[in-house]
Image (cartoon, helix red, strand yellow):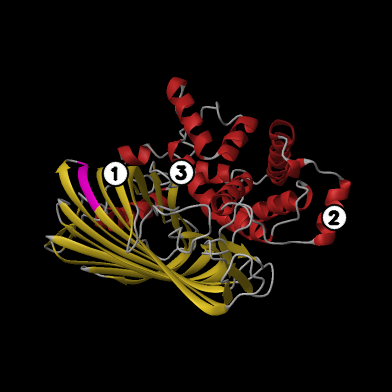
Amino acid sequence: MAIAMALPSFSQNRYDTFLDSLKTSVNRHVYGNKWKRGDYMHRVPYRHIVSTPVVPEDADISYHEKKNFWRAGAEVFGLNMGLWAFDRYALQGHYAYISWETIKENFKHGFEWDNDHLNTNMFAHPYNGSMFYNAGRSNGFNYWQSELFAIGGSAMWELFMEREYPSTNDIIATPIGGAALGEVFYRASDLVLNDRATGGERIGREVAAFVLDPMRGITRIVTGQAWKKRATSGRRFGLPPISIEASMGARYLAMIDTKGWRMGPAAEINIEYGDRFEESTKTPYDYFSFNVELQAISTQPLLSRIEIMGRLLSHELIDEQHINMNVGLYQHFDFFDSDTIRNEYNDELIPETVPYKLGVPASAGGGTMVRYIPNNRMSLDGYAHINLVALAGVSTDFYRDYHRNYSWGMGFSVKAGANWSLSDDRLSVKVANQLYCIRTKNNFGSGQNWMLRPNGGMIHIVGGDNGKTTFNHLEASVNYRLYRNLFLTGGLDLYTRHTHYPDMYIGFYDEPKDLHPSVITDSFYFSSQQLGAHVMATYKF
């Protein structure tokens, strides 16, 4: 009765349904709870849950479903104008000096591939797309409808707001990758908001939500939601099962078969949102996983990895006493970045200098998740996914132009992993593998010509490359509980890249002043491997 009174806007039928769902979902899937079928007792070390799940209230659902197209459109337009003004008057970037002539030239020339940094094209632009997306999301539109605002905002920027020609890769990566990042940020901001709160707590929650999702923060300020006290929490999704793991420690990186190593501090955050084994659903991102890795290692990028796997729809296949299994459609966002750690690196172009770079902002495919509980002492869960990669940027050994040292391509990826845990969560082991097969395309010419002179210098004759790249990431880690929610984590990562350049030729000169090469070779294969090891303290909230 006390629980029912705490949910005044929640109908009795829906409340009863929720209780049944909570018993068969939360109690079965959350570590530390028990589920009894007959005389059989399960304790599942599946995950640590931050707080008890709470169903969304009817009043909050209705409140957030009120659409406002004009406000969402104005926010997209205002964001683009604000970014342009900052670029033009604060940064004074040459690309921001636009006019009617530059706009007409953009339409006349059309789209082309650009040469920005990997992290610019594969993270910064999708992040910008997430704000376009959340302009729609915070004004009542659903996942699919909000994607249209991301497309519109990206098209406006590419065609009107820069004097550089519109970018083919940006018009793909910005809205699609933006939807993945945007939905994660939107749901994360929903967790911290509480319209019942007042005073310092309310200010802290609003600031945190603004940082997580700036467009939602702007919408709440414009509409007055940011300071309006309501009888309900205002959370669109209630409090679904949330697991958060934060790790800090040290990471060691080394090239295999070549000289060079680096070591330094590193951090990692893993979030799991929702229920893996929820019954059949068609609501995008009611379940997702999010992983980000940061490091402060010499010559290496600060942001080394981001992964998002968001469920778009799923269907339950098995729901038995010892085993659960479902299949579904998932959206993937992947970003891996590294830089040279070879000691002999210099200003000349050396193949295999950079172990790997990979950005996959547009990818989706089918997957399955399974959990097996043979007895009350341990559990085993795993997953497998096969995905189409519609757009990828993958490192190349040769192409260099402006900030770009990667090639554009398409292909597929295969991901699989397994987790084994003792029932008391004292010890757990994780193994996962990700394989990406990308076919890159020469966007700036036909074929590649490289001339190698005796002094070691290379002359790039034709830009771009055609190639076939496979990138594989094998990882394994062990967690051992030290005290309550504090764990010691040790792990290994093996990054392997193989690239075949089937139509490249390189000419070797006998003398620096020779006009013609004496030897010509073609069809090159290059491989690079990097080993990573880390030791960290992990706290499971």
Nearer-N-terminus badge (3/2): 2
| Mark 3 or 2, closer to the camera | 2
Pointer 1: residues within 10 angstroms few (<14), some, or many (20+)? some
* Residue 368 makes an appearance in the image: no
Q: Which mark is residue 188?
A: 3
Answer whether residue 40 is magenta in the image.
no
Separation of residues labelled 3 and 2 (CA atoms): 41 Å
Q: Magenta region: which residues?
A: 485-490
Q: CA distance from mark 3 to mark 1?
A: 27 Å
The residue nearer to you, when weighing 360 against 405, is 405
Query: At x 53% / y 61%, what residue is drawn?
Result: 455
Amino acid carrying label 1: it is: Ala
Q: Position of residue 412 (x, y in %)?
A: 49, 72
Mark 1 sits on what residue? 250
Q: Main secondary structure of the magenta part?
A: strand
Residue at 53% x, 34% y is 210
Res 238 quadrant in image:
top left
Is 450 left or right of 353, judged from the image as shown? right
Question: Marks 1 and 2, how far apart in space?
Answer: 50 Å
Mark 2, Cα crowd under 10 Å, few <14 / some 14-19 / many 20+, is some
Residue 265 seen by the camera: yes
Residue 254: percent from left, percent from top: 32, 55
Location of residue 177 (image quadrant): bottom right
> For residue 10, what is the image quadrant?
top left
Q: Tell me residue 151's x, y (percent).
A: 67, 55
Q: Please name whichever residue, 53 or 356, is drawn nearer the observer in this view of the structure.
A: 356
Residue 323: x, y in percent? 24, 69
Would you say the residues marked 1 and 2 are in contact, meaning their CB atoms lie under 8 Å apart?
Answer: no
The residue that disc 2 covers is: 105
Image quadrant for the C terminus? top left
Amino acid at the residue labelled 2: Glu
| Marks 1 and 2, the one that precedes in the sequence | 2
